[in-house]
Amino acid sequence: MKYFHLFCTSLLLSSCFNSLPPGSDYMAGVGPVHRPTSGGPHHPAPAIPDDVSYWDGDGVKGSPLIKINRREQKAFFYKSGVLVGVSRISSGKEDTGTPAGPYKISQKSKDHKSSVYGVIKDKATGEMVNDNADIRVDKPAAGQAFYNAPMPYFMRFNGGIGMHTGYLPGYAASHGCVRMPHHMAEKFFDNVEVGTLVIVE
């Protein structure tokens, strides 16, 4: 039974990625892939244990509000003023910061991908060439391909900036977006609407 389960799991994973060339899964080869409860199928595991994130908002009624605290690297979810969830985050690094201010969710996109950032890999081998590529600057050479960065459960609130599933190194490291553990991005996504207030502090 154990081997049958492993076979089925392997078959399921291969069916998810069989339309991609060898080694083209976004961050394959960079680090261990997240387990479903911590970060989804595309990003390396968090650099430090997440003893912060939790969700107690199921069944709680009220208007949603999100506060993002850059100093603490945490996002707080409220319903009618009651704190129902906290998520560890990684916001924008110093030169590509996440600007302070009040904003509103303007778009929700469950399977969003970046139009600018991603990785460059060798098409034939899948070997990583550049794991932090900006397609406006970094052009793939012959035999290479650019793969757009997956940003699952994307919640846009300021131009190109939004909250989404992403890698958490333990400090501010993004290009401006607010990265979250996968299970928390799902919860935030499911409980916000277009127009939900987001306050970045």
Image (spheres, rainbow, N blue to C red):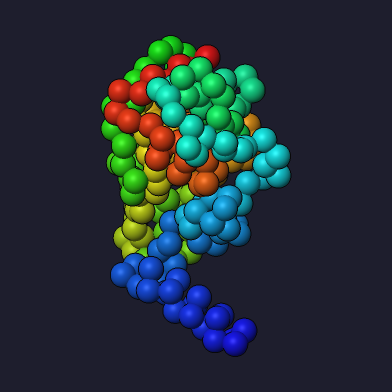
Residue 32 at x, y percent in the picture: 60, 59
Q: Nearer the viewer, residue 107 or 19?
A: 107
Q: Nearer the viewer, residue 89 or 114?
A: 89
In the image, is residue 143 above or below residue 188?
Answer: below
Q: Is residue 177 visible?
A: no
Q: Nearer the viewer, residue 164 or 27?
A: 164
Residue shown at 57% from the left, 38% from the top = 55
In the image, is residue 89 above or below residue 71?
Answer: below
Relative horizontal placement of residue 119, taking residue 2 as reference (left or right):
left
The N terminus: image quadrant: bottom right
Residue 106 at x, y percent in the picture: 28, 27
List the single residue furthest toward the top.
101
Relative horizontal placement of residue 123, taking residue 166 as reference (left or right):
left
* Count of marks, rendered view: 0
Residue shown at 59% from the left, 31% from the top = 86
Residue 10 at x, y percent in the picture: 49, 77
Residue shown at 30% from the left, 23% from the top = 195
Q: Is residue 23 visible?
A: yes
In the image, is residue 46 above or below residue 12?
Answer: above
Q: Nearer the viewer, residue 66 or 178?
A: 66
Query: Would you identify the image quadrant in which residue 51 lies?
Result: top right
Residue shown at 37% from the left, 74% from the top = 15
Residue 137 at x, y percent in the picture: 35, 38
